[in-house]
Amino acid sequence: MEKDKQIELIEQNIIPIISFAVGASLLLSFATTKYEPLLYVGLLYVSGALLINTVYLLYLIIQLIKNWDNNYEIFIRIGITLINIPISILFTYIVINHLL
């Protein structure tokens, strides 16, 4: 039963998980190849991911208000979504430092 709960939690957090995975893949691809166009793709991606994750976070906050009884799982989902913020800032910092 615990394994089913873990799979369900991953499915509920698919947006921030995919967001992190794609961002990390772009950064690692650039780090290994030094292919300059990846920098611009990465900046565009970070902008889009920021927008999507912000909308998702607002959705979670609304769900938290509506379903206060189920707040533990929603808080976990909010936490996982918020973890992407410092990671995105780090990725952006690395890219900007390379461009300058």
Image (cartoon, rainbow, N blue to C red):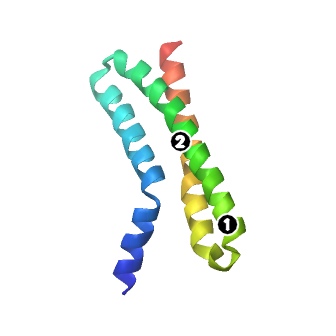
- Image x and y of residue 51, in percent: 57, 37
- Give the structural element (helix, strand or loop) at label 1: helix
- Image x and y of residue 32, in percent: 29, 28
Q: How many numbered badges does the structure rendering display? A: 2
- Which circle's residue, 2 or 1, is located before the other in the chain? 2
The picture quadrant where one finds residue 73 is bottom right
Structural crowding at the residue carrying mark 2, measured as other residues with C-alpha within 10 Å and reported as few (<14), some (14–19) or many (≥20): some
**Residue type at numbered disc 2:** Ile
Q: Is residue 58 left or right of residue 46?
A: right
Residue at 48% x, 18% y is 98
Q: Residue pushed farthest top?
A: 100
Structural crowding at the residue carrying mark 1, measured as other residues with C-alpha within 10 Å and reported as few (<14), some (14–19) or many (≥20): some
Residue linked to disc 1: 64
- Image x and y of residue 81, in percent: 56, 53
- Give the structural element (helix, strand or loop) at label 2: helix
Residue at 60% x, 68% y is 74
* The disc label shown at residue 99, or none: none
Residue linked to disc 2: 52
The picture quadrant where one finds residue 37 is top left
With respect to residue 80, does 27 lie above or below? Answer: above
**Residue type at numbered disc 1:** Leu
Residue at 64% x, 64% y is 63
With respect to residue 88, does 32 lie above or below? Answer: above
Q: Residue pushed farthest left?
A: 33
Q: Is residue 85 left or right of residue 39?
A: right
Front-most of residues 75 and 86: 75
Asked whether disc 2 touches disc 1, contact meaning CB atoms under 8 Å apart, the reply is no
With respect to residue 5, does 95 lie above or below? Answer: above
Q: Distance between the residues labelled 2 and 1?
A: 18 Å
Front-most of residues 32 and 7: 7
Residue at 45% x, 30% y is 45
Q: Residue pushed farthest front?
A: 66
